[in-house]
Amino acid sequence: MNIVLGVSGSIAAYRAADLARELMRQGHTIRACLTDAAQQFVTPTLFETLTGNPCLIDAFDEPETGRMAHIDWARQADLILVAPATANTINKLAAGIGDDMLTTLVLAATCPLVVAPAMNPQMYANEITQRSLKTLSARAVAIVEPQEGDVACGEHGQGKLAPNSQIVDTVQAVLASSRLLAGKRVVITSGPTQEPIDEVRFLSNRSSGKMGSAIARAALLMGAEVTIVSGPVQIAYPLQAKVVRVGDAVQMLEATINESAGADIVIGAAAVADYRPADPVAGKMRRGKDNITLTLVPNPDIIAQVARSYPSACVVGFAAEPTSDLSVAMEKLVRKGLFAIAANDVSAPGTGFDAEDNDIALIRRDVAPVMSGRRSKLACALWLLDNLAR
C-alpha cells in the first residue's frame, strides 16, 4: 500500500525515520513530506535514503516536472500518516488550512488519515487543540493518543508520541477497514422527498441528507463504489460518488430500483414521504375563504420493493421514530423483508434530523440489537458499515 508519511516540527521527528522503516518492513511504500519546522530536526535526505523515494518539502515541489505533486501524491496514497503531529499542524488540519505541502496534500486527499500527536502536555491539553482533535475525529480521522510521561522540555504529562508499534498497528487496522468494501457496490437513498400539492407547494419533512452523505463517505473510505439516490438537499455529496437527483417518492423508487441492479448493499437512509397528494393542482392553487381538503394516497415502500426485487443484496432500512422503543423498527424489519434496520430516536436532543450526531440501534433477525452510542454521523456510518461488512 502507498503511505504518505507527514512529519511536523516536534523533537519526536527523529522517530519518524524508524516508523518509516517499520512500515516498509510491513510491505508498504513510503513517501515522506516534511514541514519547515520538521527540518530543524530531520532532513529530506534522511527520508529519501530510507524510502528510496523523493521527499516533499515546499508546496511547489515537483519531483516530476509539470506534475502537481500535492495532487498526484494525494490521489495515489492509500493512507496519510502524520507522525509526529504538532499542535500547529493539528489545528491547521482541523481548520482546513493549506499553507504548506503537508496541509495542502491532506486537503487534496480522499484516503484515510491517521494522526499521532506529540507536544508539550499543556499544549496538548489546550482547549483549542482538544477541539481540533475532536473535529478531526468527527471526520473519521484516526487519532493515536500520545502517552503520559516526561517530555523533552522537562515537564511531565500526556504529550509523548505513542510507541511506533501502536502507530503501526493503527495504520494496519485503518488500512484493513478501508478494504472491507473493496470491489463492492453500495447504493444509498438520502434526503427527503417532495410530494407536489401544486407547482409551487409540496409535502416534505425535515431530513437534511446528512446521514446519507455520511454513509456515502464512509463507504468510499472503505473502498466501495457508491451511488446516491437523493431527494432535494442543500448539502454537498462526496465527489467520488455517483449522485442521482430525484424529486418525489415515485421518482426515487424508479431510480433506486434501476441503480440497485448488481448492488451488494442497498441502504435506505432517505426519509421518504409516506403519502402524496392524489391530484396535484396544475399551476398555483389560489387562496380562498373556504377550508380545503387534501386527499392523500400512500407512496410506494421503496426499500421493501428493493428487498423483493434483489433478494441476494444486503438491503438495510432506517427507522426514524420519536421514541427509543425498538418494537416498531423490529416490525418493519420483518414486514419489509430486510437484512437489517437502523433505528434512531429523532426526538432525542442533538441527534436525528439536521443534527451533526446520531445514535443508532442496528437490528437484525435472531440477533440481539447492537448500539452505536451517540457519535458523529460519519462515525455512526463507519460503525454501521463495519458491522454490516463483518
Image (spheres, helix red, strand yellow):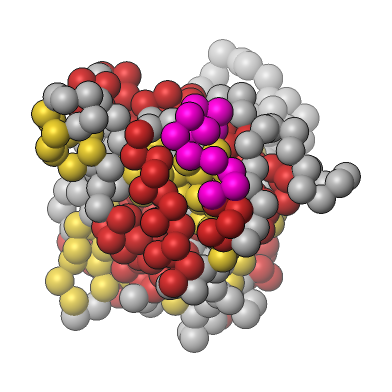
Q: Does the rendering let one see residue 49?
A: yes
Q: Going by the image, does 119 lie left or right of 297?
A: left
Q: Does the rendering let one see residue 358?
A: no
Q: Residue furthest right?
A: 66
Residue 124 location (% of width, % of height): 25, 27
Is-magenta flag for residue 41?
Answer: yes
Residue 287 location (% of width, % of height): 63, 16
Kindly indicate the quadrant of the structure image that contains residue 332. Answer: bottom left
Would you place residue 122 above or below residue 333 in this image?
above
Kindly indicate the quadrant of the structure image that contains residue 262. Answer: bottom right
Which segment did they paint magenta? 35-46
Q: Residue furthest bottom?
A: 312
Q: Going by the image, does 187 lie left or right of 359?
A: right
Return the residue nearer the eye: 77 or 322: 77
Residue 304 location (% of width, % of height): 46, 70
The C terminus is located in which quarter? bottom left
Residue 321 location (% of width, % of height): 28, 47
Is-magenta flag for residue 254?
Answer: no
